[in-house]
């Protein structure tokens, strides 16, 4: 700073370098650097550079060293904390001879701001071997997608399918909530802690053209194993867009895959499909596929192991949006102290039937297309797609549009765009099945 003027180190350095390299007259310096108004500025610049400038350069090297260490650690998926940044900073400062440097909290904060570094919740863990093989896995995913694309020209996009399983808990709870500042613990109530870990499985189908196919598989968790008891069979809710089955664990077995082919896939199309599945042994059975699709025009492609996060379309965005919808239903039931038991079989069926029905709307076509575009299966980039939150849970009106209803809106139907309260959406089972047939 000189007078009321503030000069950055870089600006001062440029002025001095220009003076040293060109040896110009003062008017020439003023012409190139108009903020230099008096000759005495140059003297002060030189003094600042000699006393503090060298230190500034050294601290800049400290920052560069810290970032290189941070980048290397995160590329290896290793944990990094503020104390590690401080240790790296002091280590480099001692090497450069800056003995009074302490790497203050303010310095660490500014460093993180400069490089857009923040604290993040760990969402996935991998073994060291998986981390070391990451480049191999990425290349395997790329090769698979290139190979798949070579077959795409032989099929209509409507006949290129992907399906995958996704586990759901019988009860969801919000991971975050508003609460009073300073309280010791933040507590949430659930109906059953056990229900937040025990799960069941869904398996929907999507096409490369952006469609959610009309039927899916739902495998419930039953103590009786792979068969429902007589009473359960009689009372089980039947919906047109779900084939319902069960297992002791709520997970699929190879027998369920056979059922999936017979009850879900074949009724939609029994020939001329390209089906992309993951490498789970129940899926990766060419003989089982040929049993139901013996024609030469049908092909099964198996995604390489450990690459599903990079090459499984369903995993790209569809399941995330599906679970978001399910969590909104759970949050509404809990917050309104609703007596509905969402872990009841028929309510589980109704819930996923409704979510499947909502996501099958034409308005979600760009979103499902993006699930294929993101890993690279298709090139056409859909127009700005909208998420479930934007289409179903962003309202222009906050009153239910059902005649005579005074309840607050819960959801906007993605088919008819009617604003509905929870009762008219969930309890009354709002759907357009008849109009879609």
Image: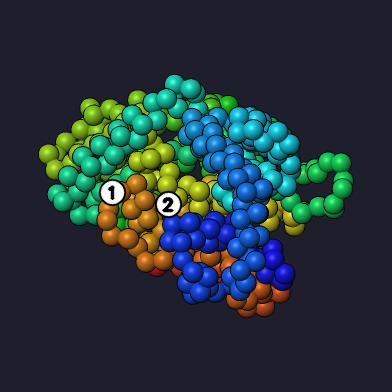
Most extreme residue toward the right is: 183
- Residue visible at 46% across and 61% down in the picture: 23
- Badge 1 local density, few (<14 within 10 Å), some, or many (20+)? many
Q: Earlier in the sequence, mark 2 or mark 1?
A: 2
Pick the front one: 28 or 142: 28
- Residue located 42% across and 47% down the image: 316
Element on which disc 1 rests: loop
Residue with the mark numbered 1: 377
Could you say where residue 192 lies in the image, as x and y percent from the top left?
72, 37
Taking the spot 66% from the left edge, 49% from the top edge, the residue there is 52
> Where 212 falls versus 404 (above or below)?
above
Residue 267 spot, x, y in % from top left: 29, 47
Q: CA distance from mark 2 to mark 1?
A: 27 Å
Q: As drawn, which residue projects farthest toward the bottom?
A: 403
Outermost residue, top direction?
A: 129
Q: Residue at x 40, y 30 (%)?
A: 134
Evaluate whether residue 245 shows in this view: yes
| Residue for badge 2 | 241
Residue 26's disc is none
Q: Quadrant of the N terminus?
A: bottom right
Secondary structure found at label 2: loop
Residue 169 visible somewhere in the drawing: no
Q: Nearer the viewer, mark 2 or mark 1?
A: 1
Side (left or right) of 349 relative to 400: left
């Amino acid at each position: 700073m000189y007078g009321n003027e503030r000069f950055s180190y870089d600006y001062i350095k440029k002025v001095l370098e220009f003076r040293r390299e060109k040896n110009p007259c003062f008017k020439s310096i003023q012409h190139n650097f108009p903020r230099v108004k008096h000759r005495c500025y140059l003297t002060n610049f030189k003094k600042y550079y000699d006393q503090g400038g060298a230190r500034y350069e050294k601290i800049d090297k400290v920052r560069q060293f810290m970032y290189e260490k941070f980048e290397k650690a995160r590329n290896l998926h290793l944990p990094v904390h503020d104390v590690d940044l401080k240790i790296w900073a002091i280590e480099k400062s001692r090497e450069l001879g800056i003995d009074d440097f302490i790497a203050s909290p303010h310095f660490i904060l500014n460093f993180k701001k400069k490089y857009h570094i923040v604290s993040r919740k760990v969402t996935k863990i991998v073994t060291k071997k998986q981390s070391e093989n990451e480049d191999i896995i990425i290349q395997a995913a790329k090769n698979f997608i290139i190979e798949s694309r070579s077959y795409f020209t032989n099929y209509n996009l409507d006949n290129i399918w992907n399906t995958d399983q996704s586990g759901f808990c019988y009860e969801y709870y919000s991971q975050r909530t508003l609460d009073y500042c300073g309280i010791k613990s933040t507590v949430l109530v659930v109906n059953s802690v056990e229900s937040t870990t025990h799960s069941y499985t869904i398996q929907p189908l999507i096409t490369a053209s952006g469609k959610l196919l009309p039927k899916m598989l739902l495998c419930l968790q039953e103590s009786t194993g792979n068969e429902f008891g007589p009473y359960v069979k009689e009372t089980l809710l039947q919906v047109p867009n779900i084939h319902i089955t069960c297992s002791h664990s709520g997970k699929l077995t190879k027998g369920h895959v056979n059922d999936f082919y017979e009850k879900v896939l074949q009724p939609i199309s029994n020939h001329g499909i390209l089906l992309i599945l993951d490498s789970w042994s129940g899926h990766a059975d060419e003989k089982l596929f040929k049993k139901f699709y013996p024609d030469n025009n049908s092909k099964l492609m198996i995604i390489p192991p450990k690459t599903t996060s990079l090459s499984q379309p369903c995993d790209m965005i569809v399941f995330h949006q599906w679970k978001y919808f399910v969590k909104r239903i759970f949050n509404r039931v809990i917050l309104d102290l609703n007596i509905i038991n969402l872990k009841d079989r028929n309510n589980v069926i109704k819930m996923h039937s409704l979510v499947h029905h909502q996501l099958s709307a034409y308005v979600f076509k760009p979103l499902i297309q993006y699930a294929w575009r993101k890993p690279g299966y298709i090139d056409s980039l859909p127009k700005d797609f909208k998420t479930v939150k934007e289409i179903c849970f962003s309202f222009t009106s906050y009153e239910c549009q059902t005649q005579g209803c005074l309840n607050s809106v819960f959801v906007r139907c993605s088919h008819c765009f009617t604003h509905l309260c929870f009762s008219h959406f969930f309890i009354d089972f709002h759907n357009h099945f008849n109009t879609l047939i």
